[in-house]
């Protein structure tokens, strides 16, 4: 900070205000000159204060201009300029339209003003006033530093919020994961959100006669996707409470109605929908007594490999998503029954795995590679199959950006399935 005794034309005390950053927080006491001062005085001040980048010019306490150090010294160094201009008024090389802001202007508004003024506001700085009277100056570099600090603080707050949201989302999924692990002897699930939170979710419920599972991919990823999982999983839970878990197609239809109603996607033809969101999903009910898997899918398929089978069968769901404006409110998804055997293997995934770009040609991972991985690891436990898939997709992705959330589930039918005696 400059020493105050250098000039008789000094501002009042500039004390920074506290909480919300304003121009006052950037206010620096600095010498000033008037129109009556000569360029010789200006030269003396710039010579005395090597770090002074600009010098305010005031008249009766009101700022009328700003002298840029570089421009002034450049002009005065030209032949005969000192002889001609030394005794002339300081306004000779003054910028008559500098950026002038009130001390109570918030930093965001000040930043927009500085951008409007262009490069000179950042290079020369700006004049700060209180009630229109000169208070001090602010520097562009200072402003940039404060803006960067504010943005960093905001980013930290956002990241802390998202990290806590991740804890909540994982806690909500934990019950389903625990149910899966308690019910199935040979099963494994991988849930990998692209960001800290994601738009994929899974849901498991066990009954004395069987168990229900769902793997779903909601619109978006990150925070918007996570909000959608809350809506969709809530609708699914309500549907199971109302209809029971044994009819996956009925549950998809119920969730479809719930999402459309909650998101305002059921208006008349003349009404503009409030959103166009929904989910892809695979829902399945396994009947322990008959070893039948009842499946209903919304743009999602099952990979099934039976003991001794030559290849992996694909059980395709309907090509209709759940929710979304173009999904009819009364659309009925089809139930598909697959007869399981002891040792039959089932694999289901969201499209984040299938669509991940990579490899030497930067193409999608695709379903064929999934089938090949299942065949190559058919005799291994579900957890090892999933680890093989994880390793393969990681190698395939390479330096490419992760495109979407990834969730996949694998289980093998056992001779005697464990059950949860929940009602």
Image: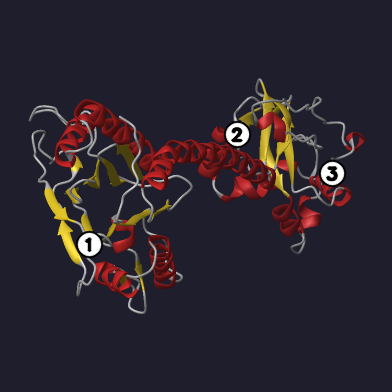
Q: Position of residue 245 (x, y in %)?
A: 23, 36
- Marks 2 and 3, Cα distance to the nearest angstrom? 33 Å
Q: Is 383 placed left or right of 63 in the picture?
A: left
**On screen, residue 233 above or below 301:** above
User: Which is nearer the N-term, disc 1 or disc 3?
Assistant: 3
Are circles 2 and 3 on residues that touch, CB within 8 Å? no
User: Which percent across, then down, holds residue 277?
Assistant: 25, 40
Residue at position x 65%, y 42% in the image = 149
Label 3's element? helix
Q: Nearer the viewer, mark 1 or mark 2?
A: 1
Residue position marked by numbered label 3 in the rendering: 41
Classed neighbour count for the residue bearing mark 3: other residues with Cα under 10 Å, few (<14), some (14–19), many (≥20): some
Farthest-out residue, right: 5
Residue 274: image quadrant is top left
SS for dot 1: strand
Foreground mark, 1 or 3, reads 1
The numbered mark, 2 or 3, whose residue comes first in the sequence reads 3
Q: Position of residue 227 (x, y in %)?
A: 37, 36
| In the depicted structure, whether residue 405 falls above or below residue 103 | below
């Amino acid at each position: 900070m400059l020493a105050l005794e250098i000039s008789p034309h000094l501002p009042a005390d500039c004390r920074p205000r506290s909480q919300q950053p304003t121009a006052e927080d950037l206010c620096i006491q600095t010498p000033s000159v008037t129109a009556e001062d000569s360029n010789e005085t200006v030269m003396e001040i710039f010579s005395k204060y090597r770090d002074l980048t600009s010098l305010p010019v005031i008249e009766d306490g009101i700022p009328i201009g700003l002298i840029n150090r570089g421009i002034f010294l450049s002009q005065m160094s030209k032949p005969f300029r000192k002889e001609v201009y030394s005794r002339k008024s300081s306004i000779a090389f003054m910028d008559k339209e500098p950026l002038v802001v009130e001390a109570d202007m918030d930093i965001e508004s000040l930043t927009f003003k500085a951008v409007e003024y262009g490069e000179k506001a950042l290079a020369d700085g700006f004049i700060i006033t209180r009630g229109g009277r000169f208070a001090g100056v602010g520097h562009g570099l200072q402003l940039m530093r404060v803006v960067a600090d504010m943005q960093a603080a905001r980013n930290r707050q956002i990241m802390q919020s998202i990290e806590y949201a991740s804890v909540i989302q994982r806690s909500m999924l934990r019950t389903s994961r625990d149910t899966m692990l308690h019910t199935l002897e040979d099963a494994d699930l991988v849930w990998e959100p692209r960001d800290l939170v994601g738009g994929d979710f899974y849901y498991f419920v066990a009954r004395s006669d069987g168990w229900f599972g769902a793997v779903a991919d909601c619109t978006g990823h990150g925070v918007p996707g996570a909000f959608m999982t809350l809506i969709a999983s809530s609708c699914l839970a309500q549907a199971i409470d109302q209809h029971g878990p044994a009819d996956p197609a009925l549950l998809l239809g119920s969730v479809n109605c719930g999402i459309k109603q909650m998101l305002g996607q059921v208006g008349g033809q003349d009404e503009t929908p409030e959103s166009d969101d929904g989910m892809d999903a695979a829902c399945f009910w396994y009947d322990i007594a008959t070893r039948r898997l009842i499946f209903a899918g919304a743009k999602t398929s099952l990979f099934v490999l039976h003991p001794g089978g030559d290849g992996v069968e694909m059980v395709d769901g309907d090509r209709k998503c759940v929710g979304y404006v173009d999904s009819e409110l009364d659309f009925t998804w089809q139930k598909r029954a697959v007869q399981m055997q002891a040792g039959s293997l089932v694999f289901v995934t969201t499209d984040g795995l299938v669509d991940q770009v990579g490899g030497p040609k930067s193409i999608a991972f695709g379903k064929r590679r999934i089938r090949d991985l299942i065949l190559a690891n058919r005799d291994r436990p579900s957890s090892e199959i999933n680890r093989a898939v994880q390793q393969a997709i990681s190698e395939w992705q390479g330096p490419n950006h992760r495109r979407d959330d990834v969730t996949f589930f694998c289980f093998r039918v056992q001779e005697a399935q464990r059950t949860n005696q929940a009602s």
